[in-house]
Amino acid sequence: MTDFNAAGQPERIELPLVWVGVEDAEILFANQFLGQVEQQEIVLTLGQVTPPVLLGSPEQLARQVERLSFVPVRTVARFGMTRARLEELITVLQTTARNFDARDRGGT
């Protein structure tokens, strides 16, 4: 679909978007999320926490935990976007959650 102005010049041309290479992209697991507001954009960082391996008796576990100063979050990806694109992402996530829940309830 093309919109034309009064002079017959195209103002806007719409073409379909086609996702290319989706099947080839690696799927990364994320279980930690961080949002930051910058000057004109929003930065979303996705990360992954792997709990430390703790083995032994309750006393040994307590000593191992005491030696930990932090649990690292490994950055998986960072995304920058405008506020408007954040709204689009929120809509996609809400729709995906509803579709997941409907499927789990035996819906479509």
Image (cartoon, grey):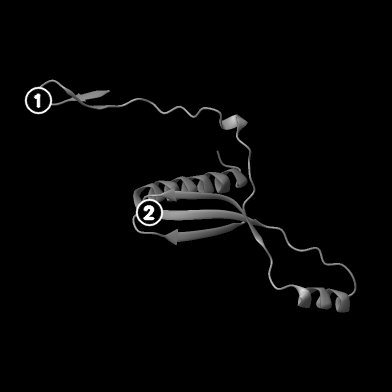
Give the residue at x 61% y 43%.
106
Say whether residue 94 is left or right of residue 55. Answer: left
Label disc, if present, on residue 41 of the rendered structure: 2
Side of 53 relative to 82 (left or right): right
Q: Earlier in the sequence, mark 1 or mark 2?
A: 1
Q: Which residue is mark 1?
A: 6
Indicate the quadrant containing the C terminus: top left, top right, bottom left or bottom right.
Answer: top right
Q: Position of residue 66 (x, y in %)?
A: 77, 78
Instruction: Give the quarter of the image for residue 69.
Output: bottom right
Marks 1 and 2, how far apart at CA: 36 Å
Q: Position of residue 54 (x, y in %)?
A: 82, 67
Task: Residue 77: give its label.
Answer: none
Q: Tell us which disc is closer to us: 1 or 2.
A: 2
Q: Amino acid at mark 2?
A: Glu
| Mark 1 residue type | Ala
Residue drawn 51% across and 27% down? 20
Q: Quadrant of residue 63?
A: bottom right
